[in-house]
Image (spheres, rainbow, N blue to C red):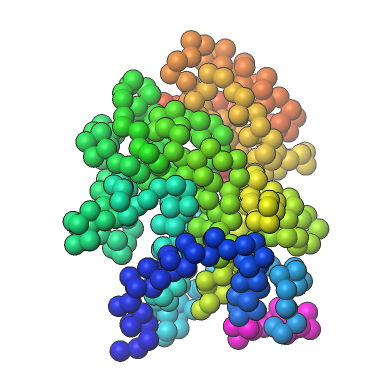
Amino acid sequence: MNCYQIQNRLFNAYAASFFLHLLFFEKRTPRRKRKYQEKQIRKLLSRAYNYPIYKEKFDRLGLKPSDFNTLKDLSKFPTLTKEEYRKWMQDELETEKAKNFKTTQTSGSTGIPTTNIYPPKEYAYHYVADLYGWVYGGYNPFWGLSLTRQPGDNEVGNKTLIQKLGILRRKTFDTRWERDKIIRTINEVKPNFILANSSELVYIAQYIIENNLSVHKPDFFCPTGENIDGRVDRLLRDVYGDGLINIYGGTEMADFAVKKPNSKTYDVIESLAYTCVKNEEGEIFHCGNGSLIVTPLFRKEYPLINYEIGDYVELREIDGCDCIVNISGRTNDVFFWRNGKQTIYKRLEDINMGLKDIFQIRFIQKSLDKVVIQVVKDAKSTKTIEELENYLSEQYEGQFGDDVTVEFDWQKELPPDSNGKLRVMVSEI
């Protein structure tokens, strides 16, 4: 039996140990948290030096791991792009040791899906980060009853002995069910907590509103899989209540930031990740506006040093702790037009927030000269389609290229993308 098979057998013990670590760590002072982060990053850099992908970066700078002693020093190290990471994981999948590891896959919302590789011990850390996010947001999963979509793996059951004793109780539903059946299940189970993909929760909420149905409001609920904008936030609260726990992260590094119900910022869980931003000139700063850079502190087998996650954010330090004040969308959420003009997500989002009589909206760039706007009319609206198209044309005037053709596509509901997400901006070119 090799060490990874032993890790597999100790999965639950590792998960429990790491959960307790998170509970106690987040009560430390900001100064002690920074010291812990520095210690972990020095370890990660030393390990990373053994991999060609990182050694080349060290050698290019003429530096060694010992040259990095503080968190500020990390700003000197180059970022790791998604393309570099994807190629590295593809190569590692061919190695003998990887056969003993767990694998997950990204949704591919920014391009080609990426396979992530975890030793069983690190996968336990990855797995329990979700659970801790719920607790940080205010929900106690140990005594509450959770209703979640069918999991993608078998690590967590719903009929174990401990659950029969009333601890970590969980029921599941299949998102392929008819929505009547899902709503009936929610009302019968009366869960304290609901977990599902954001687009799945929106899909159910649409049906509830359109058919004037009532649904049990849980104490807390958590949309996963994608960042939600202000319009979706309001919709979900209207249907499911104010217990929205918004968790931010990715399958490459687990969830590492949590927005509590009624909070305006995401708190970075600093024992899970060190965060900073890169500006348009390529300079890395601990706080500011720019492309989010994340170094997960628990990924030791395949370290992610200054990993460029792909979102544009505003990162601030509040009372000594890191907070994400705003997530403006993917850095590649930009439309480029033939005349050289650009349309960025942030500007469209600002307009979307103030729309009236519109339930959902999505923009699809078909070519350098054409954009299709998919729209779902609010069920309570008394406006005609012609009136709404004139209204939307006025709202978005000047946001696209001067010679761009705008076409409206009215739908009953917006279907999720093939990866289960529902992105507001989609470029097909």
Q: Nearer the viewer, residue 135 or 5?
A: 135
Residue 102 in percent (x, y) is at 39, 72
Magenta highlight: main SS? helix
Give yes or no for residue 46 being in the magenta stretch. yes
The relative height of residue 101 versus residue 340 in the rendered view (above or below) is: below
Q: Is residue 200 left or right of residue 318?
A: left
Residue 245 in view (yes/no): yes
Residue at (40% x, 42% y) in the render: 221
Residue that lies at the very extreme toward the right in this rendered image: 281
Image location of residue 113, percent across then percent down = 49, 60
Residue 63 in percent (x, y) is at: 76, 83
Q: Residue at x 40, y 71 (%)?
A: 17
Q: Does any portion of residue 182 appear in the rendered image?
A: no
> Compared with residue 107, is residue 64 higher up or lower down, i.e. above or below?
below
Quarter of image, res 56: bottom right
Residue drawn where x is 48% and y is 10% of the image: 382
Above or below: residue 339 compared with residue 101 = above
Using residue 256 as the reference point, say whether residue 79 is left or right of it.
Answer: right
Query: Residue at point 75% right, 82% down?
Result: 67
Q: Quadrant of residue 93?
A: bottom left
Query: Residue 97 colored magenta?
Result: no
Name, please, the residue furthest toward the bottom.
Answer: 1
Q: Quadrant of the N terminus?
A: bottom left
Q: Which residues are magenta?
A: 45-64
